Image (cartoon, helix red, strand yellow):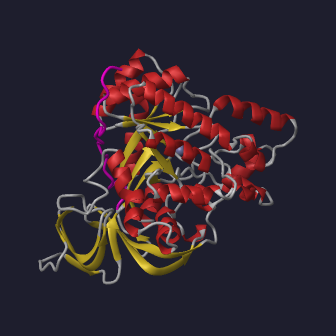
Amino acid sequence: MRLLLKNGVIVTAEETFNGDLLIEEGLISRVGGKIQSEADRVIDLKGKYVMPGGVDVHTHFNLDVGTAVAADDFYTGSVAAAAGGTTTIVDHMGFGPRGCSLHHQLDKYMEDAGRDAVIDYGFHGVIQHINDGILDEMRSMVEDGVSSFKGYMTYDYKLQDHEMKAVMERLGSLGAITTVHAETHEEIHELRARYVAEGKTQPIYHAKSRPVKTEVEAIERMIEISRKAGDAPLYVVHLSSGDGLDTIRRARKAGRNIYAETCPQYLFLDESRYMEEDGNGLKYVMSPPLRERGNNERLWKGIADGTIQTVATDHCPFDLKLKKEMGEKDFTRCPNGAPGVEARIALMYSEGVEKGRIGINRFVDVVSTAPAKLFGLYPGKGSISVGADADLMVIDSEREVTISHKNLHENVDYTPYEGMKVKGYPVMTISRGEVIVEEGVFTGQRGRGRFLKRKPVFKQIKGG
Ligand SMILES: [Zn+2]
């Protein structure tokens, strides 16, 4: 199968140029210039951008949180991702039964995604508890292609600092990276209990009970733990605040081995959303919460100056109907999370590139190339180069769209970005040389996605 893309404007994280692309057997075989070649299909992309397909390294498909199950499984979630220009996801696996092995969840997720996913996928390991067996098992997980893990500092399976240190030493010695949900548990736990006792159960108290300082303190503690663990690599997921960003910026200047991800919700939305009436504030119950306006532009600056390397979504959709049923009387009962996997690229392009906050190459870097590099997928993913997987998105920079959940493929009854107008939209998605979305219509097959064995990419830390 040969596909020839003619006359597009090719954009990578480094450069922008006019030229053709030839794809053979799912791989990019020639890049740039005028290509004359026989092909099964020739597509004229005059005036459109051809970019590496989006890499979203923070999704939660098929997530079961015990009290509720997320609305997107690996089929609907990956179709939505593809429709939005994303060709690779790295999903954060949910918690399994108490005491289970690391492979327990991997086995389950391999089965679910193997059956349903329509784009290529990898998984971040999830650490629920620590003992010698779990620390030992990390090596075989890495060998099996899981070269990153997440530890939580809050929720039921939070790790204590000495456990985090053991995790970081172990993963650091394997060249793998520790990702962390950075919020301090004790203070949040206390504030939530106090607000509930005082009858302050409206959605705004979700934000008030998780103040910015809990994120800052958690990041500071993790930076210190990483330092003690021989400078093992640390990745902060879903960074939400300007003060958290400043902490990371200082640490990077001091030479610490730390990376950061933010998400569209922290760039486009703010705390005032919790005041929406009729229970609609529950749409935004996610952790960390939306922050006061002002944080948004600070995070944008962090993207522009390189303090933040990646923009992922933390796509974790629960129907608003369910969020209201469970959380209307008490925000602490509302399942946490919001959708975003489909709108990420359009929002980042429109608000980032069109509005002049970041350049187009920086855009490609944060939504595709940098996440592929950090998580062991590059250059197979996240690049336009000979031999790379032909995973591409085509953006029409003139296309104007008003985002509405009615037009999205996500299997959830709302989007937090309802009514936002964007200029520039993905109009074609190609996965391993196959056009799987054209003009918003998915044309691929369920289960066509492949598991990506991700390599550990960091220098191995001695000792540990
Ligand atoms: Zn998450």
Q: Nearer the viewer, residue 187 or 64?
A: 187
Q: Percent position (x, y) of residue 278?
A: 80, 59
The C terminus appears in which quarter of the rendering?
top left
The residue that appears at 49% across and 33% down in the rendered structure is 223
Quadrant of the rendered image containing residue 362: bottom left
What residue is at 62 percent from the left and 51 percent from the top? 318
Magenta residue check for 458: yes
Location of residue 8 (image quadrant): bottom left
Going by the picture, which residue comes out furthest to the right? 198
Measured as percent of width and height from the top left, residue 363 is found at: 42, 64
Image: 126 above or below 201 = above
In the drawing, does residue 166 fall left or right of residue 63? left
Specify the quadrant of the image occupied by residue 201. top right
Left or right: where 344 falls relative to 183: left
Q: Main secondary structure of the magenta part?
A: loop
**Nearest to the observer: residue 193 or residue 164:** 164
Q: How far from the left and from the top, in percent, is residue 44?
A: 27, 82
Q: Is residue 78 above or below residue 398?
A: above
The range drawn in magenta is 445-464
**Tally of numbered discs:** 0
Seen in the image, is 50 located left or right of residue 359? Answer: left
> x, y (%) of residue 106?
39, 35
Q: Going 38% across and 26% down the picture, which residue do you hit?
A: 230
Residue 410 visible? The answer is yes
Q: Eyeballing the image, is 5 above or below 382?
A: below
Residue 383 lies in the magenta-colored region: no
Please tell me whether residue 251 is drawn above or below residue 414 in the rendered image: above
